[in-house]
Image (tube, coloured by chain):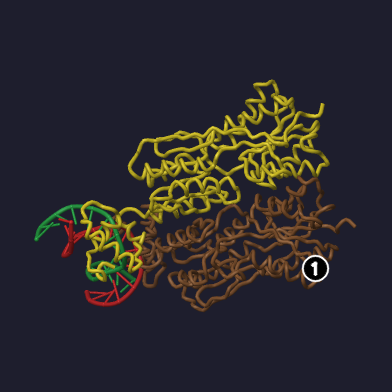
Chain colours: A brown, B yellow, C red, D green
Amino acid sequence: MASHAQVSVTAVSKVIRNAYGVSPAMRDRVKTAIEELGYRPQAVARGMRGRTFTIGLMLPHIRNPFFADILDGLTEQLAGTDYRAFMIQGGATRKVERLAVDALIDRQVDGIIMVAPLASKARLEEVAQEKPTVVLARHERSSFYDSVYDDDEAGAELVVKHLIELGHRRIAHITHQDDSQAQPADLLHNIRAATYERVMREHGLADEIAVATSFYHEKGGYEGARELLDRDPRPTAIFAGADQAAFGALAAVYEAGLRVPADVSVAGYDNTHLAALPNITLTSVDQEGSVMGGAAGKLLLERIEGRTSAVRFSVTPSLVVRGSTAPPAS
Amino acid sequence: MASHAQVSVTAVSKVIRNAYGVSPAMRDRVKTAIEELGYRPQAVARGMRGRTFTIGLMLPHIRNPFFADILDGLTEQLAGTDYRAFMIQGGATRKVERLAVDALIDRQVDGIIMVAPLASKARLEEVAQEKPTVVLARHERSSFYDSVYDDDEAGAELVVKHLIELGHRRIAHITHQDDSQAQPADLLHNIRAATYERVMREHGLADEIAVATSFYHEKGGYEGARELLDRDPRPTAIFAGADQAAFGALAAVYEAGLRVPADVSVAGYDNTHLAALPNITLTSVDQEGSVMGGAAGKLLLERIEGRTSAVRFSVTPSLVVRGSTAPPAS
DNA sequence: CTGAAAGCGCTAACAA
DNA sequence: TTGTTAGCGCTTTCAG
């Protein structure tokens, strides 16, 4: 490029980086040359000397629309910078998740955002010491990486209290099973489940606690709800830890010949688009994924710029009450 | 690494690449050293001389679970190789999509897979001349890139014929609006729409053709269906070009106080998990996303290995009939 | 079979 | 303000 435009490589480099020490005339000449030749700097070569301008985003999978909100927030935060978000799928086990994150590191990304990772805290800190890191949707406190999370305790409390206030007593919960090595208290589904139990107890409903351990997806919710509805007496309300599980739960309720909310109330978590549809009208917890994604991006850029102190950013969720919850039949 | 293990960098390189010309003894020595030091080659440095072992996957967005199937197929195909799939979000306009694909090229990915791109054929060929390229879900024929696509014509025909055979005449369609510069006939939603019209005509139903131009997402399907249901006489069946739009259509039908399928039949396309739930039971077209993703990966690896001739791989879809379609009320 | 050396396209010192 | 130069960590000749 440089030779074809009678300017030095240094000049080009400086102009590209908006660096100090180029005359306006030189800048113009280089910019023109860049235009004419359609020159684009190679990120890998830049990476050898410093930055690749690449942010690695580890997502467990891409089936939960909530992740799409996170990505949108991140993308918006990165707009106007030279950084780009590249996603990699972490998968369902710690083993493949580790491979994915290693792949990110090997490619010299400038920073890593991990969404709901299964890894142990020790492993997360190992990664964080390698690359600037932000962890989403985990609650533990580390001095090596930043955390962005929804206040799952507050969110779950909103749901359970809402159901209790409606008059429900036999409130059941569907939670998610994982293969993680994190402390139980650090993972969002465990927090939601533990909060469910705590609130039940606090309202004298310890005997009514009923938890189905399944998965946060349609099939998991369906199976979890079937199990719960088989109990005698059956619950009058089901709090699924995620909307996707709630959709499966709705299916199970209808299939059992029961009506929502007349016979069984159902509530979810995530407030996905589907929850708002008139024929679903699922009561759910909104946790503003795009805000979380944006915050993660902002914190990561700060870290890349040199911040080393750890920051924690928590989003307070809100309850969106819809038609799937109502007082129990008396 | 090399110095710390009393072997030459060349030796390490050869062992890593499984290259020809290393003695078993040397191989062992190097492998041990790699283990002990936890050495991992930097993909960016390798990229400067050849490959980055990175596949770039451009997805328009990550809200359609069908894309997750594609990703799973691709991931499986790549398992056992050193290649990793990195996703980037293309977005809703040609402009941002171009930025995303450029970002891939700048990072020297070894190959690019574009899913349902909005770009013109000329632009796709431009990309293909830069990097090995496979295009998913577009139908046009190019000699510069490989194509993997669902036979959307066959799929749409299955749906419309199914509805006609059930006895429907007033069959409406919901299609997707885009900002693409592709030839209309190359984009899947246009093919589905055109096929709908063709089959209607072939069955003497030209006068009954009714198309709502909206979007392939929940809200789009909802609005499209509302528009269609407002017509007089209203359709007895709605064929939404994608499941996500069909879910919105279902909502609109229920909201209008109508029953599915007694008053209005609804069919979708993609056969997402949600379609199978007992309370949805949406008739839909299954197009085996994981097979498509796997094929795309295989073709791309072949191209990276040197194939230059263009290959086209088409998947034949099948109709999954469920409870959302039935004969019209007579 | 082995390793020294050149060079991929950049950035950062440094000299001019 | 400019351009020359030395690497970054690999792969790839090419001598030994």
Residue visible at 73% across and 48% down? A252
Vertical arrangement, residue B295 with respect to residue A283, above or below: above
| Label 1 residue SS | loop
The quadrant where residue B124 appears: top left
Q: Where is residue C9 in the image (x, y as percent from the top left)?
A: 32, 58
**On the rendered image, what quadrant is the C terminus of chain B found in?**
top right
Residue visible at 64% across and 66% down? A190
- Left or right of residue A298, residue B84 in this image: left
Residue visible at 75% across and 60% down? A172
Query: Which amino acid, mark 1?
Result: Leu
The quadrant where residue B11 appears: bottom left
- Left or right of residue B67, residue A271 in this image: right
Vertical arrangement, residue B49 with respect to residue B330, above or below: below
To which chain does the residue with label 1 belong? A
Vertical arrangement, residue B254 with respect to residue B23, above or below: above
Q: Is residue A12 visible?
A: no
**On the rendered image, what quadrant is the N terminus of chain B found in?**
bottom left
Residue designated by label 1: A205
Q: Where is residue B310 in the image (x, y as percent from the top left)?
A: 39, 35
Q: Position of residue B9 (x, y in %)?
A: 24, 63
Badge 1: how crowded within 10 Å, few (<14), some, or many (20+)?
some
Front residue (pair A23, A158): A158
Q: Where is residue A280 in the image (x, y as percent from the top left)?
A: 75, 50
